[in-house]
Image (spheres, grey):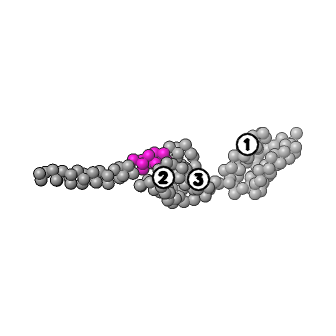
Amino acid sequence: MKYSSVAPLVGGVLCAFLLMATPACKSKNVDSEIQSAFSTKAQSDPALAGVNASVMEGTVTLTGSCADAPCKENAEKAVKDIEGVKKVVNNITVTPVVINPDDALRSSVTQAITKYEGVQAEISAGVITLRGTIADKDQLQKLMMDLNALKPQKIDNQLVIKIK
């Protein structure tokens, strides 16, 4: 009869252990699903390219960098929309992308001068320096209007007008 009184006790301990262990397993499954959902979102959203996420017990910690505050806020919102997320810790740093203004200006100037044979341009610190030759004053005037529309700091015109 001793065995029959011990069996319920062992069964009860075993059930209690299983009940306590089950939520931990469930949490890990949910965490991996959240991680997977974030990875899928990050691959489809270029704004999340510099953002990383770690998940523990439904709490998502975001790290990495975004170009601006709206990017940081959108990353947090995207994670909050994932099923199973209990809390979001947003440790993303905002590091604006610095674009050399000369690069954008250089691209626009290069496109503009293609219409004018013999004209070369150099760009430095927002200043366009023109060298070479141009057909006539009318073309020079059109070129200067095209370049002024790009809003450079200055245009240094060293062009020579061809004599007909």
Instruction: Tell me which residue sits at (84%, 43%) in the image.
Output: 139
Residue picked out by circle 1:
111
- Could you give the CA–CA distance between mark 2 and mark 3, rounded to whole angstroms? 15 Å
Q: Nearer the viewer, mark 1 or mark 3?
A: 3
Left or right of 88, for residue 106: right
Query: In x, y percent, where is residue 6?
Result: 16, 53
Residue 85 numbered mark, or none: 2
Instruction: Tell me which residue sits at (80%, 50%) in the image.
Output: 149
Can residue 66 be seen here? Answer: no
Residue 164 numbered mark, or none: none
Q: What is the span of residues highlighted in magenta in the rendered image?
A: 28-38
Left or right of 120, for residue 44: left
Query: In x, y percent, where is residue 11?
Result: 23, 50
Q: Residues within 10 Å of mark 1 (few under 14, many from 20)?
A: few
Give whichever of discs 1 and 3 has the lower sequence position: 3
Is the magenta region chiefly helix, strand or loop?
helix
The amino acid on which the numbered mark 1 sits, given as a three-letter code, is Gln
The amino acid on which the numbered mark 2 sits, given as a three-letter code, is Val
> Which of 37/103 is in front?
37
The quarter of the displayed image where residue 70 is located: bottom right
> Which of 62/5 is in front?
5
Residue picked out by circle 3:
74
Give SS at disc 2.
Answer: loop
